[in-house]
Amino acid sequence: MNLQDIAADLRKVREISPLVHNITNVVVTQFTANGLLALGASPVMAYAKEEVADMAAIAGALVLNIGTLSAPEVEAMLLAGQSANRHGVPVILDPVGAGATSYRTETSRRILKEVNVSVVRGNAAEIANVIGVDWHIKGVDAGEGSGDVAELARSAAREWNAVVAVTGKDDYVTDGQETYVLHNGHPLLTRVTGTGCLLTSVVGAFCAAAGEQGLLRPAVSAVLSYGVAAELAAEKTEAQGPGSFQIELLNRLYRLSEEEIVRHGSLEKRS
Ligand code: ATP
Ligand code: TZP
Ligand code: MG
Ligand code: MG
């Protein structure tokens, strides 16, 4: 996998404009929809148990985000996830805040048990807490954990038989065999809520456009493209701060070019 492959994956997302069904949290709903639209994908949010199976069946990808859970939403996620599985639609999970409460940890584990999840995207603390490694988490933010993040990502991928993306200053994306480390992004991403959640939905868009190939490549392509867009947005808005950065991130997802990916992308293969 190289930067030209990633540029080609971005082109494919824009050509196909895949429908991404999101069951996400109330904090990030509009930002997620706008981010997917800016990129060139087609977002839909649908939560009612009466319709989630039908919506997941016609989507290119289903994104389950546990950020503001409730019992009806858990029921809807399981129904949607199982429908996606029956129809060959990839399911992407964001275990927001797993480890902060046992409800979040247990729900993440339940989804992973009852649904065939293709990709899990979270910060190190969330991934560690779902697989049961001790790692401090502060609310929905990563906290002060320390440890070998590459090894954490690999163990999680093997345990869940899924692609795992552990994000932070550096991002680790692995299928348990091959691991890529990505060095793009900007600290301003941590000053705007929902930037991780939007990234998870962007992973959904790239997986939806990927067709029959494995999902390691589209997951890497999504995380790298997003990181480059964020860097370019920060270059222009760092002096102003998070408000301007949030808007500019949408602009840069919209304008992100294949040339910018090749020029600015930083991708390293680990194993
Ligand atoms: P958290 O709530 O802990 O911030 P999150 O779910 O919001 O987690 P992040 O890990 O922050 O997700 O990842 C979202 C994006 O921010 C990714 O593209 C990641 O590479 C980027 N990112 C996070 N921290 C940094 C950092 N310190 N420097 C550069 N990029 C970062
Ligand atoms: N509280 C519940 S969900 C949420 C907050 C603040 C948004 C988390 O977004 P992200 O992308 O994980 O930072
Ligand atoms: Mg965040
Ligand atoms: Mg998050």
Image (tube, rainbow, N blue to C red):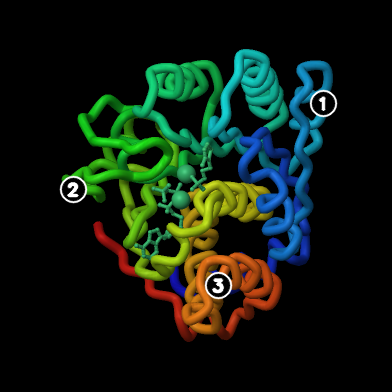
Q: Nearer the viewer, residue 241 or 104?
A: 241
Q: Is residue 38 left or right of residue 239?
A: right
Q: Nearer the viewer, mark 2 or mark 3?
A: 3
Mark 2 touching mark 3, by CB under 8 A? no
The numbered disc on residue 229 is: 3
**Front one among 172 and 108:** 108
Residue depicted at x 70% and y 71%: 254
Q: Nearer the viewer, mark 1 or mark 3?
A: 3
Q: Position of residue 211 (x, y in %)?
A: 66, 50
Mark 2: amino acid: Asp
Residue with the most extreme left position: 147
Q: Residue 93, labelled with which disc?
A: none
Q: Point out the frontmost of discs 2 and 1.
A: 2
Quadrant in which the N terminus appears: bottom left
* Residue type marked 3: Ala
Judging from the image, what secondary structure is the residue with disc 2 in?
loop
Q: Please tell me whether residue 221 is drawn above or below residue 116 in the rendered image.
A: below
Whether the residues at callouts 2 and 1 have beta carbons within 8 Å, the answer is no
Label 1 sits on what residue type?
Asp
Q: Quadrant of ligand 1?
A: bottom left
